[in-house]
Amino acid sequence: MRHHSTYVALAVLAPAMLAAQSTADLVLVNGKIYTVDNARPFTSALAARDGRVIFVGSDLEARTLANAATNVIDLHGATVVPGFVDAHAHLLGLGTALRRVDLAGSASYDEVIARVKTWAKDVKPGEWIQGRGWDQTRWPSKEFPTHEALSRAFPNNPVALTRIDGHAVLANAKAMELARVSASTPDPAGGRIIRLPSGAPAGVFVDNAQSLIGRAIPTSTPADTRKAILAAIAECNRWGLTGIHDAGESAGTIAIYEELAREGSYSLRNYVMLSDPGEAGSPEALANPYLRRGPQSALYDGHLWVRAIKLYADGALGSRGAALLAPYSDEPTNSGLLVSRPEHIRAWAEAALRGGFQMNVHAIGDRGNRIVLDAVDSALKIVPKADHRFRIEHAQVLSPEDIPRFAKLGVIPSMQATHQTSDMRWAETRVGPQRIRGAYAWRSLLNTGVVIPNGTDFPVEEVNPLLTFHAAVTRQDPANSPAGGWYPEQKMTREEALQSMTIWPAYAGFQESILGSLTPGKYADFVILDRDIMHVSDNEILGTRVVSTWIGGKRVYEAK
């Protein structure tokens, strides 16, 4: 009788199970699908329903889940990977950069001025001109520029041009006049005004000194900000990005993200970090609406997370603002800048542990990194907590004794592969042949048992995640230089590189149960590529084209 009742139960269940199984709204077949799921790492077919993956496996099986209404796509051998996630980016920064003079790659100061002139030909007298992307290490002199040539070219317009890394701004005389900056203006804490021999500002303002110019620039309207955000999202989707970790945004910007997500106009999964909210426990921090709300996850059907706080320990290596334990090899009077006091980072580490927020701190120099590791160490003794997943953003130059501390303290090094290929031309000049061994040290860190979520820091580097993948596996620039790679012992494998752009960012954002791999139950976020990046030769990787980008089983970008 027991057997009979089991058969009856199965007979009743079977049609219901079949009905449930036969309603995929999207089926992909005949592809090379890399799932980043160890249970089924490589397959040919995938099925999704209501924005989630319901099956990965063979074409034969997947086709049984299709009915007349199902969108069945024959991939004709194309490659599918989980949606790329940029674990350190600046969405509004990208949107703003798309509407300003692009100075990236300028080979001289003259070229910078020429590009600004071309862009600004219709700008009216008195209007601000802004640009981003100059990098003096690409110029013959390698020295910071002074304002005179820019002031001569634009006597009637204030001009503010941000360095490629976002850690210095070049202003002309008109901009400095409007900002009321003069020889008597003191360097602010954590900032440096580069000066002429007379003591007058030379035009370059480093790290916290940038705000001296920034305060004079008219603020964008919410409508302008909204347009910039939508342009940046479209740019992300074009390159195969389905998600980003947004490294520091204001409450006002996040409110616009929420507005767009509510409208269904936000085709991106954004793990947003709140910009430094001020002193922990201060009225300013207590008034922050997002801190008051507490940690928020997967809002608007998994489009927004607000559960992290972004702080800054130091500046950048290119502008010699990264805080070093010993002076710069190429400027022995300078050891960099602390953008925040160590006590500030320590106080937030404790407050974040207590409030359930993640703390993510920008640290580039070995001193900057040590200060953050010390702060986390000290906070965990006061507020012991498992699985806090605090992060150091960049972790660029590390003292050898600090490399094992990431794993020991549970701190995630969030790194950017293309920073290495951009910086390798001059990084060793900054820190010398010994310290360079702890710089961009992916393999040394991976060997301790940590994961490395990868990103671009766009608009500092280009948005294209295939540049990240190529740099991670070759340690070469897009021209495949240097031969064999720069300090090649620090390379990632292709499997690690793909993980660093999918499942590792998901882990770094507490999202691994719903994102980061093509696993039944997770969101159907994926990218279709026209070649197999896991097997083509190194020098063919960058020829890969994004065919289409999908978020929650819906196409958000298709190549023309």
Image (tube, helix red, strand yellow):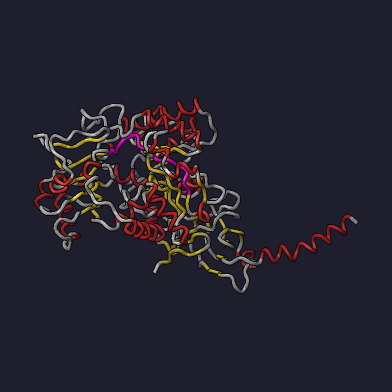
Residue 229 location (% of width, % of height): 37, 57
Q: Residue furthest right?
A: 1
Magenta span: predominant SS is: strand
Image location of residue 297, percent across then percent down: 51, 48
Residue in the picture at 50% in, 43% down = 295
- Quadrant in the rendering for residue 415: top left
Q: From the viewer's side, name the closer residue of 485 and 429.
A: 429
User: In this rendering, is residue 321 above or below 70?
Assistant: above
Q: Is residue 535 visible?
A: no
Question: Extreme bottom residue here?
Answer: 68
* Front residue of 173 and 556: 173
In terms of depth relative to the viewer, which is nearer, 179 or 134?
Answer: 179
Q: Quadrant of the N terminus?
A: bottom right
How many numbered marks, from 0 up?
0
User: Residue 458 location, x and y as percent?
Assistant: 34, 50
Magenta-drawn stretch contains 45: no
With 348 as the anchor, is 507 left or right in this view?
right
126 with respect to 63 (left or right): left
**What range is drawn magenta here?**
305-317
Between 287 and 315, the one lying in front of the other is: 287
- Tell me residue 82's x, y (percent): 50, 55
Quadrant assignment for the C terminus = bottom left
Query: Does residue 476 lie above or below 67 as drawn?
Result: above
Q: Is residue 311 magenta?
A: yes
Q: Is residue 77 visible?
A: yes
